[in-house]
Amino acid sequence: MRLGVDFSEYGGDLAPATAECWKQAGISFVIVQYSARMEQHLGILQAAGLEAEAYVYLYWDRSPWNQTPADRTNAALQLAAGRVSRLWLDAEDQTHPYNEAQLQDCVTVCKLAGIPCGIYTGRWWWVPQTGNSQAFAHLPLWHAEYVTNDPQARLDLAPDPGDGFQPYGGWTRPTIRQFQGTSTLCGHSVDLNVADDSPGGDGLSDEERKIGKELWRKEVAAHNLANVWRLEEGGADYSTLVITDAQGQKHTLAAEVPSWLVPGATPLS
């Protein structure tokens, strides 16, 4: 399992020593809030070599700053400037009625920007507020369900992400589990998270993640293949993929790889 933290602007600026302390504690990924402090937070994480993701709190209808959810999503992506591996859409607001079309607009903004997104929520909110909608079950889930209210961070209590998970919204297992709320780790206010061993909790190798989780999903679905997780060969720009299915059968696939993925990919020899 991989341990991570998320934190908001209310904890103040992030100190370099704190990021290093997190690394020593076993933290391998950090999720930052879209806020006025996001630039500073991402800069420190980048310097520390910590994997960064981000989240944006969505206010249905309009935010107190007169932004639609899509406005906030777009602003978060612009601030992130390619420095995050995923943007999480935080669905928990109860100040206005939930608006599914607005959440879909946010997903579309991420798709057009070429940045993977996911949904942050909890069963306690999703089921009553959305009517247990399954419209976003194809996206990763960052699920909030706590195992302790200790004010001090308890990394030792990290469960398997799927332990005790009751399916909702079409999700059968969360990609990330937020297992402890507001607590203190290395002197900074954080929430604690756990994900599966592979980055992003998606069961893919590092090499496969470099060419994009969504690409693999598309190609597997298009060719009706099951349990395809291994990249065998790749062209210089990954325009061709040779993959092995669960029965050991090789398949050559033509793939349209988004240009934003290519700089992060290392072509295989």
Image (cartoon, rainbow, N blue to C red):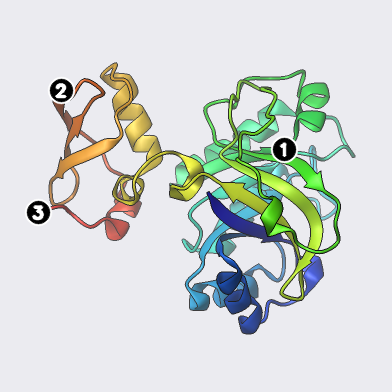
Pointer 1 and pointer 2: residues touching (CB < 8 Å)?
Answer: no
Of the two numbered discs 3 and 2 in the rendering, the one whose residue sits closer to the viewer: 2
Q: Position of residue 108 (x, y in %)?
A: 54, 37
Residues under numbered marks 3 and 1 in contact, where contact means CB atoms less than 8 Å apart: no
Q: Position of residue 237 (x, y in %)?
A: 18, 50
In the image, what residue type sits under mark 1?
Answer: Thr
Q: Nearer the viewer, mark 1 or mark 2?
A: 2
Closer to the chain start, of discs 3 and 2, is 2
Amino acid residing under circle 2: Gln
Of pointers 3 and 1, the one earlier in the residue sequence: 1
Distance Cα–Cα, label 3 vs label 1 = 41 Å
Q: Is residue 216 visible?
A: yes
For image coordinates 83% across by 23% down, the residue present is: 128
Q: CA distance from mark 3 to mark 2?
A: 21 Å
Q: Is residue 23 above or below residue 237?
A: below
To which residue does mark 2 refer? 249
Query: Looking at the image, is 18 positioned above or below residue 84?
Result: below
Q: Is residue 33 visible?
A: no
Give the structural element (helix, strand or loop) at label 1.
Answer: strand
Residue at the disc numbered 1:
121
Q: Is disc 1 surrounded by few (<14), some (14 to 19) or many (20+) residues within 10 Å?
A: many
> What amino acid is at disc 3?
Ser
Q: Which residue is mark 3?
A: 269
Q: Position of residue 45 (x, y in %)?
A: 55, 72
Q: CA distance from mark 1 to mark 2?
A: 39 Å
Task: State the residue at coordinates (85%, 30%).
Answer: 97
Q: Earlier in the sequence, mark 1 or mark 2?
A: 1
Give the residue at x 60% y 51%.
74
- Left or right: where 148 falls relative to 231: right
